[in-house]
Amino acid sequence: MLDRIKSFAPHIIAVIASLVFLDSLRFKFTNAPETQVIFGKLDAWAESFGAGGLFAQTGLFSQYVIGTAELAAAACLLLGILPTLRRLQGLGALIAFAVMSGAVNFHLWTPLGIDPNNDGGGLFFTACVVLATSLLLIFVRRREIAAIAGGVAAALTGPAPSLTTSKGSAQ
């Protein structure tokens, strides 16, 4: 019974994180007032040190860029439930961790604060939950992530040189 729970737990975690991401897309992609407040505060903060526009609608970290990263994470997490696509779950967890690390840190260390939309800190709490679940999933899928990293490294460096040479063969 415990083995069965262990085998399903990563998928349950992936579904929870994906649901959070997919739910947030309706705010980000429709330019909802809540999203305007959050990204407006972040852009005003960035403007204070000369990086205005960084969080604007066409900025490097706009709601659309972050929303697209969340969509990619959700897709990878959900597709990774399929045994043949298991590696994608690790990739989705890495993307989720990156996005939520930024979200949690921006809530903590900028004027955004923990409760920017007067929701009792619900948005911040949800970001912390997804950050924790993605970190747990990274640990669970560490072998798959290592395999992805190995494949990327092999693709970038090319095939390993052969250490054996045949003597007497015509070359």
Image (cartoon, grey):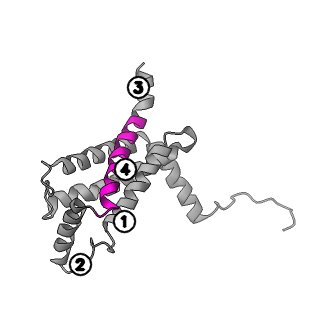
Reading the image, the residue beneath label 1 is 65
Magenta region, mostly helix, strand or loop? helix
Q: Is residue 79 left or right of residue 134?
A: right
Image position of 81 (left or right of 130): right
Write down the residue under mark 3.
Answer: 5
Q: Is residue 22 left or right of residue 116?
A: right
Q: Which mark is residue 168?
A: none
Q: Which residue is mark 2?
A: 51
Q: Answer with mark 2 or mark 4, whichever residue precedes in sequence.
A: 4
In this picture, is 98 found above or below 8?
below
x and y percentages locating residue 156 in the rendered image: 56, 65
Q: Is residue 49 magenta?
A: no
Q: Secondary structure at mark 2?
A: loop
User: What is the CA distance from the residue labelled 3 to the residue labelled 4?
Assistant: 25 Å
Residue under numbered circle 4: 22
**Circles 3 and 1 in contact, beta carbons < 8 Å:** no
